[in-house]
Amino acid sequence: MQDAVLAMLAKEPSHGYHLHARLRRSLGPLGESMNRGQIYVTLARLERAGLVVCERADGLPERPERKVYALTPAGQQRVAAWLAEVGWPKPDLAEFHLKLAAAAAARLADPVELVAAQRRELLRRLREAQRAALAEPVGSGAGLLLEGVVLRLQADLRWLDACERAWSKVDDEVEGG
Amino acid sequence: MQDAVLAMLAKEPSHGYHLHARLRRSLGPLGESMNRGQIYVTLARLERAGLVVCERADGLPERPERKVYALTPAGQQRVAAWLAEVGWPKPDLAEFHLKLAAAAAARLADPVELVAAQRRELLRRLREAQRAALAEPVGSGAGLLLEGVVLRLQADLRWLDACERAWSKVDDEVEGG
DNA sequence: CTCTTATGGGTAACCGCTATCTATTAGCCA
DNA sequence: TGGCTAATAGATAGCGGTTACCCATAAGAG
């Protein structure tokens, strides 16, 4: 979040609400879930860390005071460092994996059933993402983002197939043994 | 995290360190990054919420006191609810997307270069995951998990290809215009 | 016998995010 | 004109997770 805000400020100084709007526009449909208040918390921390400064540009006395923030040299340095680093979020498949293991171990549910339910959900999201991608203008950033979502969902569906194969075999062994 | 701990307790009561070991074993190489202290924080919260109870079973006086936790009826209910829900983590591609946009807008870096660097990193991780998968016994839970990681990385690499195509086109337009 | 290291178990502080609350501005409508 | 609603701008509290650190035991090394 901090890096995202700094990245927006690298283009031009803004106040909290404007930053929020720019982020949402940049992320398209995936930015819907962004919280408004988070921006201000993040800005306060960035200011405390000396990465941004607040230039009070409340020119109109009748408007609510809005604080316009801009990058400090340290902030620019951090943006450059962020751009230079090659990080990638680690896959978060552990939860479903544990769910299957727990269901089988405690005999609380049928793992193959859980996989089937999950596949229905992912197919639903896949259709939704494809529909949203069609609504975006071609070549837009949001459309590209949605393409990534679609590719991920397809990969996850393939993984569910593998899960089903694996847990079906376990069931057979239990029944057979 | 809470659900993961509850799921382990659904199979059998355990104390903190044992739970940590079981979780790590169940997750294979992906469990390496798990923090030990987190287990105790989580157990304390679960106890406060009335989902688990602590039966002090420190039979040997010379051993350090270890608290054995077990599910309460409310805890069993929550495990059942967790198994019933069909959730899936949302794709977290936004950070890289913002990185590309910020690099291009502030002219701090070449987006196509960033994509190339990211591709190198993902290929490295892909090789690593495939190697780890070969080290796991076939049919084990950890092996299945690693297969999911591999499928995801392959999907992300395809997305990077799409990113490169999109941002190359943008560069052409800028140069041409 | 002491020093060091590894293991087992725990606590506290910090950080990020979400939800919620306040206050002002603007638009609408009766 | 008064009252309702939405949008804008900002602040706060609480939850969940991670990190860093602390305490005790056990095993070796000198």
Image (spheres, coloured by chain):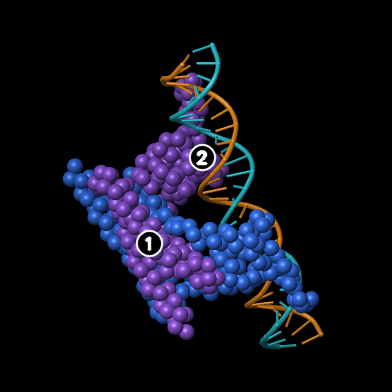
Chain colours: A blue, B purple, C cyan, D orange
The Cα atoms of the two marked residues, 1 and 2, are separated by: 34 Å
**Residue B133, position in %: x, y?**
29, 49
- Mark 2 is surrounded, within 10 Å at the Cα level, by few (under 14), some (14 to 19) or many (20 or more) other residues, namely few
At horizontal 27% and vertical 56% (from top left) the residue drawn is A162
Q: Is residue B95 visible?
A: yes
Identity of the amino acid at label 1?
Answer: Arg
Q: Is residue A111 visible?
A: no
Q: Which residue is mark 1?
A: B119
Which of marks 2 and 1 precedes in the sequence? 2
Q: Nearer the viewer, mark 1 or mark 2?
A: 1
Identity of the amino acid at label 2?
Answer: Gly
**Residues behind callouts 1 and 2 on a single chain:** yes
At horizontal 58% and vertical 59% (from top left) the residue drawn is A77
Name the residue at the front extreme.
B175
**Residue A132, position in %: x, y?**
42, 76
Q: Is residue B37 above or below residue D15?
A: above
- Mark 1 is surrounded, within 10 Å at the Cα level, by few (under 14), some (14 to 19) or many (20 or more) other residues, namely some
The chain letter for the residue carrying disc 2 is: B
Find residue B37 and name its label: 2
- In the displayed structure image, the side of residue A158 where residue B58 appears, left or right: right
Name the residue at the left extreme.
A176
Looking at this view, is B55 or B137 the one in front? B137
Residue B26 sits in quarter: top left
Q: Secondary structure at mark 1?
A: helix
**Residue A135, position in %: x, y?**
43, 80
Looking at this view, is D18 or B46 the one in front? D18
At horizontal 39% and vertical 70% (from top left) the residue drawn is B164
The chain letter for the residue carrying disc 1 is: B
Looking at this view, is A149 or B42 the one in front? A149
Looking at this view, is A28 or B135 the one in front? B135
**Residue C10, position in %: x, y?**
55, 34
At horizontal 35% and vertical 44% (from top left) the residue drawn is B28
